[in-house]
Image (tube, rainbow, N blue to C red):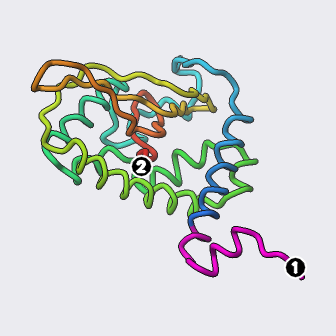
């Protein structure tokens, strides 16, 4: 008798289990390829020699620093604004033509941009709802941002993974930190969120 795997058993009992498992597998593949293709583990400033990174309009409405992005994140949370948080994300066109276009060929071959975009939008939608439930209308005061994971530099683009936002609680002035900005892209001196952490 052939034994069925836990994945197969789970899929029979709950189809959403299979979909979730496949998404997790694809996510791990993408992250693995990003780690392999990382050319350096530090921030490389834009010296103007790379034509791909010279146009600051590539990420419309982007922020000039991670702190500026973090400050806008806290404001949107304080306002309980789902729309405000959505505006921090790259658009579909920006993801396709700016972010994904600068990814290494190995990653592009592993996953079409449409699949990656769908994963990101699904995760970000859930993340926004959860974070508003947890921290919405708390009137937090922004303090700073910290990059706690990898900084991956491509030609004309830098990706920051796991950007932590540090904020001050209004009730007692103590500081708290929260993980929300899962992947942030910087292109042409502007940065936006690629996907929120759910």
Q: Nearer the viewer, mark 1 or mark 2?
A: 1
Q: What x and y, as percent, mark residue 114? A: 56, 63
Which element type, helix, strand or loop, lies under badge 2? loop
Instruction: Classify mark 2: residues with Cα within 10 Å, few (<14), some (14-19) or many (20+).
Output: some
Q: Which mark is residue 2?
A: 1
Name which residue lies at 40% across and 34% down: 191
Residue 14 within the magenta-colored segment of the rendering: yes
State whether residue 197 is above or below residue 15: above
Name which residue lies at 24% across and 49% down: 132
Mark 1 to mark 2: distance in Å?
37 Å
Instruction: Classify mark 1: residues with Cα within 10 Å, few (<14), some (14-19) or many (20+).
Output: few
State whether residue 167 is above or below residue 6: above
Q: Main secondary structure of the magenta part?
A: helix
Task: Quadrant for residue 6, please give it.
Answer: bottom right
Name which residue lies at 61% across and 52% down: 27
Q: Which mark is residue 198?
A: 2
Q: What x and y, as percent, mark residue 8? A: 71, 74
């Amino acid at each position: 008798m052939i034994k069925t795997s836990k994945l197969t058993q789970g899929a029979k009992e709950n189809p959403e289990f299979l979909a979730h498992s496949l998404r997790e597998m694809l996510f791990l593949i993408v992250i693995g390829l990003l780690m392999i293709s990382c050319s350096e583990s530090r921030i490389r400033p834009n010296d103007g020699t790379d034509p791909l990174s010279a146009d600051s309009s590539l990420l419309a409405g982007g922020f000039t620093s991670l702190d500026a992005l973090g400050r806008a994140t806290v404001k949107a949370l304080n306002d309980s604004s789902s729309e405000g948080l959505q505006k921090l994300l790259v658009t579909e066109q920006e993801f396709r033509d700016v972010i994904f276009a600068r990814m290494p060929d190995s990653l592009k071959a592993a996953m079409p941009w449409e699949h990656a975009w769908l994963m990101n939008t699904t995760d970000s939608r859930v993340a926004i709802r959860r974070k508003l439930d947890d921290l919405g209308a708390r009137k937090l005061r922004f303090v700073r941002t910290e990059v706690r994971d990898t900084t991956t530099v491509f030609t004309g683009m830098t990706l920051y993974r796991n950007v932590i936002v540090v904020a001050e609680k209004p009730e007692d002035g103590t500081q708290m930190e929260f993980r929300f900005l899962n992947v942030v892209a910087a292109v042409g001196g502007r940065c936006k969120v690629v996907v929120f952490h759910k």
